[in-house]
Amino acid sequence: MSLFRKKTVTQILSDAAEGESSKLVKTLGVRDLTSFGIAAIIGAGIFSTIGLASYNGGPAVSLLFVFTAIACVFTALSYAQFASTVPVSGSAYTYAYVAFGEIFAWIIGWALILEYAVSNMVVAISWSEYFTSMLSGFGVTFPKYLATDYGSASRAFQLVQETKQAGIALTTLPDNTRLLADAYANAPVVGNLHLIANLPAGAITVLITALVYIGIKESRAASNILVVLKLAVIALVIGVGAFYVKPANWSPFAPNGMSGVLSGVASVFFAFIGFDSISTTAEECKNPQRDLPRAMLYCLGICTVLYVLITLVLTGMVNYKELGVSDPLAYVFQKVNLDFVAGVISVSAVVAITSALLVYQLGQPRIWMTMSRDGLLWKRFSTIHPKYKTPSFATIVTGFLVAIPSLFMDLKFFVDLTSVGTFFAFILVCAGILFLDAKGLTAQSKFKVPYINGKYIIGAILLAVVTYALTNDNLLQTLENKPLLVVFWGVWIVLAVQGFRHNFSLLPVIGVLTNLYLMTELGASNWKIFGIWLIIGLVIYFSYGFRKSKLAIREREDAAGI
């Protein structure tokens, strides 16, 4: 029995044709797919994490959006080729099963479970910020200690106390810091514990989970309407905000240098991960081989332009130091006394983010379900409700997995953790294309990543970059601060050698390297938690999935001559 047993393309297509997925209706065209991608990308990213990225890197973060979008383009092309070769649901989990085998499929599936769960925690926390902002616009004050996490409030209170003791005026602190400190001070106390929790975040997760449980989901028409609403709000922000831009706020353009810009990579990358959801609709596309690649590139291009413009407007309206909030779009208009516009943004954001929460919360249980149907998880996860026709048990588990942490954890922590799993999935998809091409398994694919022979280019660029790095006096210090760069260089060397031997296509290699480099910019603490998550997953796999998977059962039957 092998850890690397694989599903063939023929086997996956046959299983899809025989299973429940064969009942799906192929109705989506390129316009619908593009709209779906925009709906998924323009969610919590543009309404919340864009502020955190700008706070870290200043106006120069607009360039980071461009760089990250380019990395996503290479990944999107690889996703598109996989979708053309294996036009079934399952996304990166299914692709890994074909390219690398069961153990990698399990790892990527387990990482996707974390990605979707943590993404929804971010969305729920962001929803809470905009919901309370919307209430305040209507004159309703929601207690701050019931709409934030304990850690943020505690740290803010400690910072205020230290500022007082140093004799520094509290007005030097950001408004949000003082609000959080007041929330900590005013919270009910039991013993020595301040009762602080983000109730709106937990409540909306429970509500959405209940809706998903009984089968509520966005129709194509509703999705298109929501996209129009979101784009209208963004146009309002850009159009009105442009009149309040002060060019002086763009200087210095990169106040914290390149390290400050790159420190926001997790926040920026989180804004783009929604394009991955397009690949999950392959079985419902009229022509997935043609339309999926176009839709992925269209939505990435549109959203990149919007993100860059939004970043420039936000950092031009107020100083970047004031953008470390979870509702930056509404915040900047309140700062310039345009409360009406801020109110419109808050109401629209609540609707837009709710739709994103619904999309992710629908996808998460179906990952559990797919892995369960392959035998890698307990059968109960693939249980379909007899009345509502939804994965009922998996949906309930998802609700608990998202709701409880969103009550007590902060936004920044989840953003970084989400990106670790996403980068990992993207790297495997790009690497999978190299493997399939080398084995000649994509010869019949109707879409292929444009081929540029990397035989000499990969190694030549590596030599040039290494030469430049060796002349850098801060090389050792850089490696000490970012030890994962050693992994990056090691992978690049392997790709250069294998690329020379097998004439690797250059674009998937660039996809692997850009995603891997961006991974090195993430915090070490998040890597540790991601590692713990993978260890838990491997324990589950070896104690259950390794023996119970359908491929394992087939191996035993073949060995027994059944």
Image: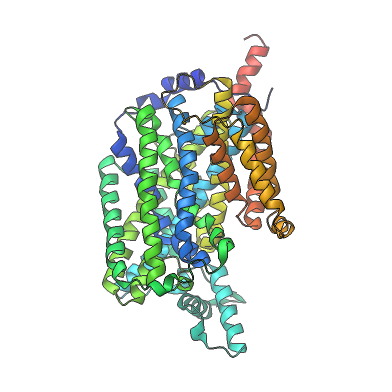
Rendered location of residue 223, percent (x, y): 30, 45
418 in relation to 157, above or below: above
Indicate the colouring scheme: rainbow
Give the quarter of the figure containing the C terminus. Answer: top right
Regarding residue 390, the answer to whether it shows in the image is yes
Rendered location of residue 394, percent (x, y): 49, 41
340 in relation to 48, above or below: below
29 in relation to 161, above or below: above
Relative to 400, is 21 on the left or the right?
left
Residue located 42% across and 49% down the image:
209
Q: Nearer the viewer, residue 1 or 453?
A: 453
Regarding residue 380, the answer to whether it shows in the image is no
Relative to 232, is 81 on the left or the right?
right
Q: Nearer the viewer, residue 469 or 229?
A: 469
Relative to 166, is 426 on the left or the right?
left
Residue located 65% across and 35% down the image:
496
Give the quarter of the figure containing the N terminus. Answer: top right
Q: How many marks?
A: 0
Rendered location of residue 364, percent (x, y): 47, 43
422 in relation to 161, above or below: above
Q: Residue furthest bottom?
A: 167
Q: Quadrant of residue 248?
A: bottom left
Q: Nearer the viewer, residue 171 or 121?
A: 171
Rendered location of residue 117, percent (x, y): 51, 49
